[in-house]
Image: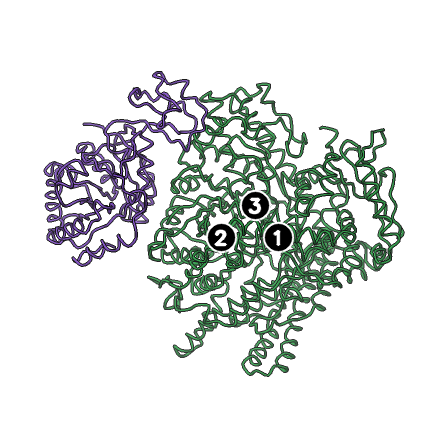
Amino acid sequence: MLFKTDPAAPLHTGEKSTKSLIHLLVRTLLHTVAASFNFRPGLRRYLKTDSGWFDFTVGIRTESGSVATAVRFREGKVRVLREIPADCDITLIFASDGAVRKLLQATPTEQIFMLMKSDLRTVGNQSYMNLFFFYLSLLLHKKQKKLMAREKNDSRKALQKSSPTANTAFSDELRRRSVSRMRAESRDPGVRYLADPYLSDYSLADFPRIGSFLETHFTVTAEVCPERPRLVTDWYKQNGFETDGNGDPWMPELRQAYAFKYLMENRRPIIRKNDLIAGTTTTKEIGVVVYPDSHGTMIWSELLTVPHRCLNPYGIDRETVDLLHKEIFPYWIHRNFKEWVREKYGSPLCQAIDERFAVYFIWKQAALSHTIPDFPKILRLGAKGIIDEIRGQQAASEDDTGTQKTVLEAMALCLEGLVAYGENLASQAETDAAAETEPKRKAELAHLANICRQVPAQPARTLDEAVNAIWITWIGLHMENTNAGLSLGRLDQWLQPYFEADMAALETEKQRQDYITHAIEMVACFYMRCTDHLPLTPDLANWYFGGSSSDQAITLGGVTPQGTDAVCDMTYIFLKVTEMLSIRDPNVNARFHPGINSDAYLKRLCEVNLITAATPSLHNDAAVMTSLEEFNYAPEDLRNWSATGCVEPTLSGRHIGHTNFQMLNMVAALEMAIHDGYHPLMKWKIGPDTGAVEKGDFKTFDRFFDAFCEQFGFLIDQSVEYNNMLGIAHQYIRPTPLLSSLIGDCIEKGKDVTHGGARYNSSGAACIGLADVTDSLMVIKKLVFEDNRVGFAELKKAVDDNFANDPALYAMVTKKVPLFGSGSDEAVEMADRVTRFAHDRYKSHTNYRGGPYTAGFWSMSNHVIYGTLSGALPSGKLAGKPFTPGLTPEPHASANLLDNIRDVARLNPRHMNNNIAFNVKVVPGGDDRRENIIERMFSYVKTYFDMGGMQMQMNVVTSETLKDAMAHPENYRNLLVRISGYNAYFVTLNSDLQKELIERAEYGL
Amino acid sequence: MTHPLILEIKGNALDDGPGIRSVIFFKGCPLSCTWCHNPEGKRIDAEIGFDAAVCVGCDTCMGVCPENALSRDNSFFIDRSACTFCFTCADACPSGALSRIGEAMGVDEILNLVTRDKPFYDTSGGGVTLSGGEPAMFMDFTGALLHALKDRGIHTLLETCGLFDLDRFNRLLYPMLDIIYFDIKLFDPRAHARYCGVSNTTILANFKALHARAREGGIPVIPRTPLIPGITDTPDNIRAIADFLKECGVSEARLLPYHPLWQEKNRKIGVPPDTDGSPAMDKWLDNTVAKECREVFEAAGIRTG
C-alpha cells in the first residue's frame, strides 16, 4: 500500500516536513474561528450541550504534511494546536495544498464533489466532522446561503437561456394521457365484484378529498421533525443506553422495547384534516424523520442551511436546530452504527473504503429495514392476539439463560406501545369529532374513533379497519426502524378478503357501487399517508440517491401461495389509485405470472404505465422464482414474494433479506484490474497485485478476466466484512423487537430479526455497471486478444487519456465490437460470466445472521454517481459519464429495441437472485390510438417475459419532454420517472441524473 | 437461383404492416423513381457508401485503398469511377463511415436472424415484411424464403412496385403471402415512364388481377401511393388513381407523405441531388396537401386510415 493514502498512517506528523503558505492560511483561519467562539457569547453558547461542554479535536492536514494543524474544543474554550495530537477525534486530510485552496473557494455543491472525488478524506469519528462543519456554518451560513442562492439562480438562468419558453405541448400531452381510458376486455377469475376491472369510469375529479391531499403533497415543503429523536433520547438519558439504572448492562432488545413503548405512548396522536386514516409518522404535514442512532448526525453540518440548499430542501425551525444540536446529537456521537464499528473494530479497511465513496456503499450504516412485515398476522390476530402468542411462547420456553423470554418480553412491550398509540388515536378522534361541526366529517371522525378502538389492538373486521391497522402498524415500524426501503408487500392480496366480506354484506347494487368508490378512496388515502414522511437526506446524498423517497414498495398480482391466479378486485383498485395519483410513493411493483395471469391484467399494467409515465415496475413471477430456486424455500413462501425497496424479492413476512445491504461499483474492480490494484480516482493501491498491462502480464484474455475477478472478489469480500460488522452493530445499537414480532419464526425462536430470528435470512447486493463492464471486457477480448487490432497497453493509454488523442480507436471500440444488447451471443455469455462470478462469490459468504448473500443487478441512482467517480473505460464510456442504469444495455448497442430485450431476457436468472432493473424508454407516436400503443407495450413485455426476462420498467416520455421539464419545472411537478428500481419526480433530481435520463435510448411505440 | 443482395434487416418495425415486424430490404429494383426513398436499393450490385457525419478523419482508409480513389478534395470522398469495390477501405474503417452496401445472404441466414423475433411476432400479430428494392425481382429466391417463413408459421407481407411477371408471381410468391402492399405511384403512363423509368401498364394490370383475386377470397392487396410534391400529389394524379381504385372496387388504401431524408442517402452512395430545382422536395410534405389527397380518396369511398 502507498503510505500517503493509507488511512491507517499515523495522523500526527512528527517528522519534519516543510509547511506551506496554505498552512499559515489555515492556521490564521482557525485562529479566527477560535477567537469568534471564545469571545462572541452568541457563538459560545453552541460550545455547550445540555449536560456539559463539547470536547473534541479536529486535525487538518494535507497528504504530504505541508499543512498540519488542529483545533481543540474543550471546556468551552477553542484553541489552535501546533500539531495534530495522537488522540485527535477527526482528521481532515486534503490531497494537496491546492485542494485546501479549492475548498475555501468552492460552492457547497463543489465541496460535496471534492469529498466524493477524494480531494479530501477523513480519518476518525465523522459525527465530529459534522459538528465542526456546523460550527463553521455558524460563522459562514450567511455566505453559504448566498452561495446556494447563486448556485440555484445560475443553473436556472442557464436553463432558461437554453430554453426561454416552455413548450406546453409536451406537458399537456402528459396531462392528457389520463383522459382516454380503456375498458377491460375480460374479467380475471379472482375479480368478484368489479364490472369493469379497469375502473375506467373513475377519475381523480371524483375524489376531491384526494385532490386536495395531492395539492398538499406537491406544494408543502417537508420539515425536519424532532419528535422521535427527542422522545427516545429523553428515555435513554433517563434510563441509560449501555447500562441500566442499576449499572447492569442493558439487554439491547429490552432497552429498545422500553424506549419504543415510551415513544409510542408519548408521541402526539394526530388525525390529519379530512383523512380517512388515523395517525402520522411525524408532527409535521410532511415530516423528515430523524434517526440519530443511524445516520441522523449527518445533517448536523446542514442544520442552518438545509432550507436553502438547491436540491430537496427541508424546513427546520429554530427550536429544532437547538434541540438537535444541544440535546439530541451530542448523545449519539458515538452511539450509531458507523461509529460503533469504527471504535469496536479499530477503523477497519472495509470501512475506510466505504467512506471514499467511489467503490461501494453499505446501507446498513443507515438502515436494515428492507423487508416485508407479516401484515396478515396483525390483521388476523390484532396486536393483543400476538401478545397472547408471545406469552404462550414465554411460558413454553426452555431456555435456561432467560434470553428468549427477555427477547419475547421486548416484542410484547413494543406491541403494547403500538396498542397504546392506537388508543391515543381513538381518543384523539373522539376529541376531534366532538369539536367538529360539519356533520359528514363529524361522522367520519366518530367512525375513525371506533376503528382505532378496535385496531391495531384487536383483529380487523372491515376494509376500513384493515387499512387503518396496516397504517398504524406502519407508523410503529418506522418509529423503530429507519425509513429506508421498509416495504408493504402484497396489499391487494391481504385486503381482498376484507373487501369481499364488506361487499357480501351489502344488499343493493347502488350500495355496492358506492362501496367500490369508497374502497378506491380508502386506498388513495393510504397512498397519500405513505407520502407523509421523507428520509433524512444529507446534501451529499442528493447526488448519491437523488430524489429517492423511502421507497415503500407495494406488490400486486402474481400467484397465491397455492400457485393460483392472485389477481383480484383489490389488484385493480390499487392500479386505479396508482393511475389517478401518479406519485412516487408507494413504489408500485406488479407480478405477472406467464401462463397464469391474464393478458387483460398485463394490458392494464401497460396502460397505467403509459398514463403515469413510469409505474408500475413489471416482474416476471416465474423467472424471479427460478432465480431463488437454489435456496429451496417452501413453495408457499416463495410464491408469496414481494418486491422490497426497489425491485428485490423478499418472502413476505418470513424473511429478512436486507436486499439492499450495499451498492457496489463493479466498474471500480475493472479499473483496478487495468491498473494492477490501483484505483485511479482515489489514488489508492487498494486491491491485490494482479498484473500490469504495460508489462505484458496478460497473455490471454482469460488471464485478464481472472484479474478482474480477483479485484471484484476483493471488493465483495471487503464489503461483506463491513456489512457483517454493521450487522453486529445493529444487534447492539438497535435491535427491532416490533418488526421481529411481525416476521415469521422470531416468536417461535425467541430471537430478534437482527440475530437471525426470521425463518429466512439473507443479504442482497446491488452490483452496478454490468453493461459497462461487459462491453469493456468485450472490447478487450475482441480488439486486443482476438482481432489484434490494438495492443492492450495502447488501449490502456487511450483509456487513461480519456480517448482524447485517439478518435479512431474511440470509434473502433464504440462501433466495431458487438455489445451487450446488440443480439450477440458472445456478449450475453460475457455478461453471464460476470454475473456468475458475482453470484458465486457472494454466495461463498455467510452473513452475521447465518444467511447467504445474493447478487442483484440494478443500481438505484448510483450508476450516475459511480460513473462520475470513474474514469474512461475500454467500452468508450468517457471519464465522469454515467454508467447505464441497472443492467440496461448501452444506447448504441443496437438501434433495435428487440435486441436489447432479447439479450436481457437471455441472461441466466439463477445468477441474479437479488433481481435486476432493465429500463426501457418508449414513446408513443402522436396520432396513435390508445389501444394500439398499449398493444405494442404489451407485446414487448409479454414477449420479454415469455423469453424468461425477470424485470422491466418503462419510462414513457420523450427526451424532448424531459428537456422541457428540466428548464421549466413548474409545468412538471408530478412528472414521474423510473431511475433504476425506484420512482422519483424528475424535477427534484440532481442535474446529472436528469441528463442521464435524457440521454437514454428512446424507442418509438 | 440468383442470390440477391440484402441491404438491411430492420427489426422492431412498427409501420410496415400489422404488429411488430422485421423488414428485409432487397437490393435492386426494375423501377428508377427519381424520389426513391431507398436509393441504395435501386442498383442490383454492391455499392460503397460514405457517411461524412460519422467519419472521424483518421485517414486509415487512404492508406489502404489500392486505387487511390479516396480524397478529401472530392465532395463525395470516393471516386467511384476508380473504385473497384474491393471494400478494403470499408473493412479498415474504424468508425463505419465507409461501408459496404448490400450483403449476399442465403435463405437460412436470413431465416435465422428473423426467427429470433418470432415470439414478438406472435404476441403482437406481426411477422416479416419483404421490401426493397423489389423482392419480386428475385422470384426463385423470394419464393424459397417465403416458403421457409411459412414453414415456421410466420406471417408474411410483400411491399412491391408491382412490376413483375404475374404468372410466375402467382405460382412462386402468392401462395406464401398473407398481405400485399402494392404501390400505385402515377396513373398517367407517360408520367410514370418519365419519373419511374418505365411505363405502368403492367403494374396496373397486375394490380387489377391481384385485387380481383383478393375480392374472391384471396389475400388482401392494399394499394399505396407516395405523395411526392408536384409529381404524384397533383390533383389530377390523385383523382385518377382514386377513380382507378374505385373502379377496381378498392375500399382501403394508404397514402405515404413525402420526406426528404433520401437526399442524404443519395449523397452517401455518390449520387448528386436531383430534385428538379423544386424547393418542396427539400421539406417534409405539407400536412394540408396530405389532407386534401386523403379527402379525394375518402370521397371515392376509399379509407386511408
Q: Which chain is green?
A: A
Where does residue B241 sit, x and y in percent of width and height? 15, 49
> What coloring was used for the rendering?
by chain
Q: Chain of mark 1?
A: A
Where does residue A357 sit, x and y in percent of width and height? 65, 41
Q: Secondary structure at mark 3?
A: helix
Q: Are marks 1 and 3 in contact (CB under 8 Å)?
A: no
Where does residue A224 sit, x and y in percent of width and height? 68, 60
Mark 2 vs mark 3, CA separation in Å: 16 Å
Where does residue A570 sit, x and y in percent of width and height? 45, 64
Q: Secondary structure at mark 2?
A: helix
Q: Nearer the viewer, residue B128 or A16?
A: A16
Q: Which residue is mark 1?
A: A153
Residue A96 falls left or right of residue B214: right
Q: Secondary structure at mark 1?
A: helix
At label 2, which amino acid type do we have?
A: Asp
At label 1, which amino acid type do we have?
A: Asn
Q: Which residue is mark 2?
A: A964
Residue B283 falls left or right of residue A291: left
Q: Which residue is mark 3?
A: A992
Asked whether residue A562 appears in the rendered view, the answer is: no
Q: Nearer the viewer, mark 2 or mark 3?
A: 2
Question: What is the quadrant of residue A466 in the picture?
Answer: bottom right
Q: Image height check: is A392 above or below B239?
A: below
Q: Chain of mark 2?
A: A
At label 3, which amino acid type do we have?
A: Asp
* Residue B123: mark in rendering: none
User: Which residue occupies 85% across, 45% down?
Assistant: A31
Residue A399 falls left or right of residue A838: right
Q: Chain of mark 3?
A: A
Quadrant of the rendering where the N terminus of chain A is positioned: top right
